[in-house]
Image (cartoon, rainbow, N blue to C red):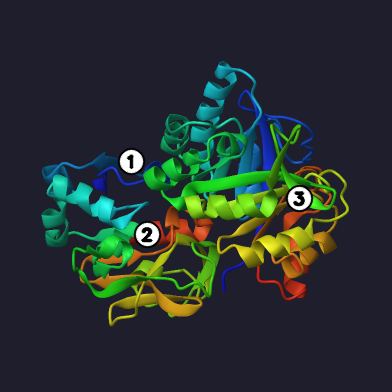
Amino acid sequence: MLTKRIIPCLDIKDGRTVKGVNFVDLRDAGDPVELAKQYANYGADELVFLDISATLEGRATTLEMVMHVAEQVNIPFTVGGGISSVEHVDALLQCGADKVSINSSAVKRPELVNELANKFGSQCVVVAIDAKQINGQWKVHLAGGSIPTDIDLFEWAKEVEQRGAGEILFTSMDHDGTKNGFANVALAKLSEELNIPIIASGGAGNVQHFIDTFKEGKSDAALAASVFHFGEIPIPYLKKELKANHIEVRF
Amino acid sequence: MKLVIINYGAGNIKSIQFAFKRLGYDAVLSNNPEEIKSADKVIFPGVGEASSAMTMLKESGLDILIPKLKQPVLGICLGMQLLCEFTEEGNTKGLGVFKTVVKRFDNSVKVPQMGWNVIKNLKSKLFRDVKEKEYMYLVHSYYAEHCPETIATTDYGLNYASALQHKNFYGVQFHPEKSSTAGAQILQNFLDL
């Protein structure tokens, strides 16, 4: 059976890991390659690198980092953050990234999803969607959640699926950072209405939250950052607990 | 040992090159028929859409060359599918090495299948020291139907051939280059053939 995936997410700035990575046994917690290898050894199923570099130089450095990760890490990884062109995606894939994640640029120019799917295949196109509830309606937000739009989450998700997205990474801004659990009602609706995998993001605080998002939220994968970086939830322990709760995981 | 990865423009071959590098082998990327013919081992990769990949193969005459190769050849993902007789993707005629056809998963499952699934019923030297039901990373929307050449199977809505072998030709649907240490073992086994 296809297993549920556990995906640590790393923020990268100018080729270095930023914010809160606190692994005791790492020589250099700022080195994304070192960290990625560690996660791969701990049983992470995939990795996501989110590039938050503000400058072109920073982005160039990220490309180099992608190359080093691809050289040394033997599990798949996705790169996201500030990607808006076919050329940029081409460069990332040439450096060895397995998938790319696009967000605001897809909303601004939805044809980008088609272009990427046609040129590189749906399997490497992840569309990330940030959304929060406004008067009970899930509305898509742009630019890291800072700009609200009138676009409905479910309509948008269906549109990008039609345009060739291979996967949806849904972050609930209502849940992100709360450590109170994932947005399972919305996730289950996405999973039922779409026929591509859904990655849950935002809200992971304890093991039960992962169990819930796989069972109630019908998520195909769960992404988290701080609970993994600070060792609050060691991945081997998480997987053992998931298995004990009859959730199929690679373990 | 001379190891050549066929480079015909289809998909991300860096990952495969890096995976062999981690095993201590430098693989050459090439679409040159002489270079490919002279290799000890050949990797036939592929990511993307079948009909356009086949067009690229034809443009360089590789569609004629590949089925005639005598040394061990490993088709990975789309590479394996193109070695079959036919694929529903773009209604594409394949290279006909494996006597089976490639079909699309129906919508009773999410498509693409993306992630880690187990391979079982392993029967080939390719799987030496790989345990039954080992996890492999897969990303695909089309699958090869069972045939006598099946050397591994996987369940996803149905049971399909996740690896095939015909004489010196091997094909794997999963990505050994992205499947952790067990995947690396399979690549090493291929080199040891």
* Circle nearer the N terminus (2, 1): 1
Mark 1: amino acid = Asp
Q: Which residue shows up at 41% across the image and 77% down it? A: B160
SS category of the residue bearing label 3: strand
Are labels 2 and 3 assigned to the same chain?
no
Q: Which mark is residue B26?
A: 1
Left or right of B18 on screen, residue B107? right
Nearer the observer: mark 3 or 1; the answer is 3
For the point 66% across and 55% down, the residue is A154
Q: Position of residue A11 (x, y in %)?
A: 69, 34
Q: Nearer the viewer, mark 2 or mark 1?
A: 2
Quadrant location, the C terminus of chain B: bottom left
Q: Amino acid at mark 3?
A: Trp
Which residue is pictured at 63% across the width and 58% down the height? A198
Identify the residue shown where x is 61% and y is 17%.
A55
Q: Which residue occupies the foreground of this view, B172 or B159?
A: B159
Residue bearing the label numbered 3 = A138
A202 in relation to B147, above or below:
above
Image height check: is A158 above or below B88?
above
Q: Identify the image quadrant of residue A206.
A: bottom right
Amino acid on which disc 2 is placed: Cys
Q: The residue marked by circle 3 belongs to what chain?
A: A
User: Residue A88 in the image: x percent, y percent?
Assistant: 47, 30
Q: Residues within 10 Å of mark 3 (few under 14, many from 20)?
A: some
**Which residue occupies the foreground of this view, A183 or B154?**
A183
Give the CA separation, mark 3 to mark 1: 50 Å
Mark 2, secondary structure of its residue = loop
Q: Is A135 in front, or is B173? A: A135
**Residue that mark 2 sits on:** B77
Q: Where is residue A89 drawn, in percent x and y?
A: 47, 35
Subunit of label 1: B
Question: Quick check: can you spot residue B16?
Answer: no
